[in-house]
């Protein structure tokens, strides 16, 4: 019997790491193209490290999911330590990581309300940017800063719910699909290995 938690953890890490690389790539490319004076990879160390620490904080949680029996009752001490750890993890994800991003955007990138997002210059009018030409309203860098903060919160919320579901279902098993014993014509299905062994016995 295959355990549900084994495949769920693998899928979770694939999605989360892919989201991490994608988000950092988009932010890094945009900052590199629009900001002057910054060197590659165009990201703040505090923001990146805070995000990586949040990933590392999930490792003990997944270790418990895989190794602790689902029917084992937690002691008072285990419950207290677990609650403090989960509180710190949620505080880090929803407090520290967005704070580091907002500090980076405001202090180093100068994404303020008086800086407008205009996009790349249009080839037919060098005085206007693509977004400035296409949109009937103005978008400031402060708005973009807040939207990225919302995206960070969204990633944390989705991961939060996913981990809760995985924890509740950590004791479930996945049964292997049963092989059909008869074909659609009503004849018994014989595996190739059975045929080969039968042929050897006959020889």
Image (tube, rainbow, N blue to C red):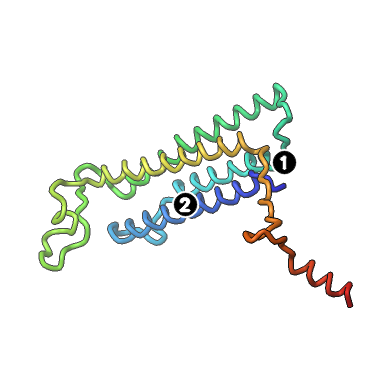
Q: Is 156 on the left-hand or right-hand side of 169?
A: left
Give the residue displayed 63% in from the left and 42% down from the top: 62
Secondary structure found at label 1: helix
Q: Can you give x and y, in whole percent of width and height, for residue 169 in the image? A: 62, 37
**Residue placed most toward the observer, 34 or 177:** 177
Point out the residue furthest to the bottom here. 203
Residue at 13 percent of width and 56 percent of height: 133
Q: Earlier in the sequence, mark 1 or mark 2?
A: 2
Label 2 element class: helix
Label ID, residue 67: 1
x and y, in percent, of residue 116 in the image? 19, 49
Residue located at (60% from left, 32% from top): 85
Nearest to the observer: residue 163 or residue 173: 173
Residue 147, image quadrant: top left
Which quarter shows the C terminus?
Answer: bottom right
Residue lying furthest front: 186
Q: Residue at x 15, y 55 (%)?
A: 134
Q: Which residue is mark 2?
A: 20
Relative height, residue 104 to residue 168 (above, below): below
Question: Dot 2, how many residues are within 10 Å of its Cα: few (below 14), some (14-19), or many (20+)?
Answer: some
């Amino acid at each position: 019997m295959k355990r549900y938690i084994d495949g769920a953890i693998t899928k979770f890490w694939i999605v989360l790491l892919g989201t991490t690389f994608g988000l950092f790539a988009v932010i890094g490319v945009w900052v590199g193209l629009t900001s002057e004076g910054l060197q590659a990879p165009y990201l703040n160390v505090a923001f990146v490290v805070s995000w990586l620490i949040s990933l590392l904080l999930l490792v003990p949680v997944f270790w418990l999911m895989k190794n602790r029996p689902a029917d084992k009752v937690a002691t008072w001490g285990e419950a207290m330590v677990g609650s403090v750890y989960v509180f710190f993890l949620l505080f880090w994800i929803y407090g520290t990581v967005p704070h580091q991003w907002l500090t980076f955007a405001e202090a180093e990138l100068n994404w303020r309300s008086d800086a407008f997002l205009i996009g790349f210059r249009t080839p037919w009018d060098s005085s206007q940017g693509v977004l400035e030409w296409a949109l009937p309203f103005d978008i400031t860098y402060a708005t973009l800063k807040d939207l990225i903060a919302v995206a960070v919160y969204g990633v944390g919320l989705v991961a939060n719910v996913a981990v809760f579901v995985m924890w509740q279902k950590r004791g479930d098993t996945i049964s292997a699909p049963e092989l059909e014993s008869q074909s659609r014509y009503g004849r018994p299905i014989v595996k190739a290995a059975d045929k080969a062994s039968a042929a050897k016995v006959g020889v």
